[in-house]
Amino acid sequence: MTSSLEAPAKEPLSSSKATIVLEGVARRYPARRRRDEPVAALEGVDLEVREREVLALVGPSGCGKSTLLEVVAGLQDADEGVVSALGAADAQGRRRVCAYMPQRDLLLPWRDALGNAALALECRGVPRAQACRRAAPLFERFGLARFERARPAELSGGMRQRVAFLRTLLAGRPVLLLDEPFAALDAITRAEMQEWLAGALADEPRTAVIVTHDVREALILADRVAVLSARPGRVVAELDVPEARPRRRREVAADPVFAALEQRAMEALGC
Amino acid sequence: MLRRRYLLSGLLLLAILGIWQAVASLPGVDHLTLASPGETWRALRDDSHLLFSNAATTLLEVVLGLAIAVGLGAAAAIGMHLFRPLRDAAYPLLIGSQAIPVVVVAPLFVLAFDYGIGPKLAIVALICFFPVTVNLIDGLRSVEPELVKLMRSFGASRLAILRKVELPSALPYLFSGLRVAATVSVIGAVFGEWAGADRGLGRLVLLGINQLQTPRVYAGVVILMAMALLLFAAASLLQRIAAPWSRAELPA
Ligand SMILES: Nc1ncnc2c1ncn2[C@@H]1O[C@H](COP(=O)(O)OP(=O)(O)OP(=O)(O)O)[C@@H](O)[C@H]1O
Ligand SMILES: [Mg+2]
């Protein structure tokens, strides 16, 4: 399939060299009041993500998943340790190779869906009209046809999430960092969107880190699952997920291999 | 819903008019201090040309003064938003400017400029600058930090963040400020005219008091109130056109 998105990865496909490397990463938030202790969000995180690999990051609430993603995205700096993405070790360099999708969709209410999807392109200096022309053909493929002119308030939760994902994709970066992309959706829409994202990632192969609360979701989407401990977060288990992507939700639910993996992930989470 | 709103407003207005008329017809009420609604209405009708030509002058002062306040206020707010030291330095002065007793300095303005429109614009702008600027600063700061983070991750420049995210988010706040400014602007213009003018509704009212033409004074005040209401409604309408995603306060 020819991609209408500029393929950002210059490297040969399926090489196994690491795209994202974290070594001994720690991040502490300074205390709000003077007598409080600083909050240690991450402590001694070691993690590698290979090229075109999809890594799912699961962990209990408040364990530092969003923090980890923002550190990789270059929106925060680690207090200790080494972070690099495609060889860029400084925050600014990481910002240039990573596209980050925050926990909430954060669509601009005054722009229609097309304008929102084009936002990342515009930030790269593409004029508005041209950015919209480039985003438009993707609406069909992402199940958003005929909703180009709708404002976010007129879209369903799943559609808003698709627009947000499209916007992230159009940033044209080789690394995708998705923070709980479906947490705000109802169970049925979430199930639909998981398969949809699995398909989208098969169409548009990228190196991706997906944060989620949901082990099942991780097993549907990822090549590998990293389990974080409670705060301060560090990687306590890494599980390889067998079978090629994209996977269907039903297969994952029925297959005993996945059931065993789910069991191991839950154990690592301490459940 | 809307119909009921207007109905209630109308009823309240009628009640007030009724009480006004009743008080005015009490024996012993001095007709030089209180004109009845009927007398006011007759003044409105008989002096309509005089009243409305002066009202046009005042309206022009108000609208131009507001425009100046919005222009300067927007520049000040954006400057203070982009440069933190400027905000820290200028915010106390901004608040202080609200304590300037406009009634007292108005004659100084007239001395400094002349009898023309200049001092009126200066006074209207001085009064309106504050609500516009403070609301716009609040609006610019109201943007979710997450959104700014997202823009930074897209590689947006500071200016792009201002243009694409902060200014549109601040628009409804600007209009809130504008509605407050619109209502106080009329008072500003009247002060300006009291300090020295050769036309305008404020001057007409002042003359009316001196010449004991009480009904005309009341008629002038009624027109000033209508003007404030009209400006408020215009600001709300403008908000609906410029920022349809936000909910504008319904004009009365
Ligand atoms: N800006 C901040 N200042 C201070 N503390 C923070 C800040 N951001 C996060 N924290 C703290 O750091 C810890 C990790 O936060 P983070 O948002 O990374 O967790 P998370 O795993 O993404 O949680 P969730 O699953 O609820 O999204 C939390 O205890 C939080 O209170
Ligand atoms: Mg989070």
Image: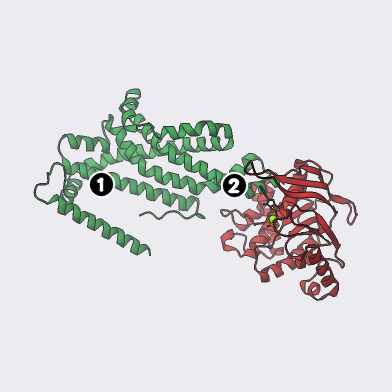
From the top left corner, tell me how far across and down residue B163 is, in percent.
Answer: 59, 43
Tell me: A271 left or right of B140: right
Q: Nearer the viewer, residue A248 or B207?
A: A248
Chain ID, mark 2: B
The picture quadrant where one finds residue B104 is: top left
- Of label 1 and label 2, which has the lower sequence position? 2
Q: Colour of chain B?
A: green
Q: Is residue A96 above or below residue B211?
A: below
Q: Colour of chain A?
A: red
From the top left corner, tell me how far across and down residue B139 is, in percent.
Answer: 52, 45
Give the residue number, with chain letter if any, for mark 2.
Answer: B165
From the top left corner, tell me how far across and down residue A234 is, in percent.
Answer: 79, 53
User: Label 2: how many residues lie within 10 Å, few (<14), some (14-19) or many (20+)?
Assistant: some
Q: Which mark is residue B235?
A: none
Q: Are marks 1 and 2 in contact (CB under 8 Å)?
A: no
Question: In the picture, which quadrant includes the C terminus of chain A?
Answer: bottom right
Q: Can you name the residue that lies furthest to the top here?
A: B112
Give the residue number, with chain letter if any, for mark 1.
Answer: B222
The picture quadrant where one finds residue B22 is: bottom left
Which residue is painted at 77% across and 45% down in the image?
A: A94
Chain ID, mark 1: B
Q: Can you name the residue that lies furthest to the bottom here?
A: A254
Amino acid type assigned to the residue bearing label 2 in the image: Val
Report helix, strand or loop for mark 1: helix
Amino acid type assigned to the residue bearing label 1 in the image: Val
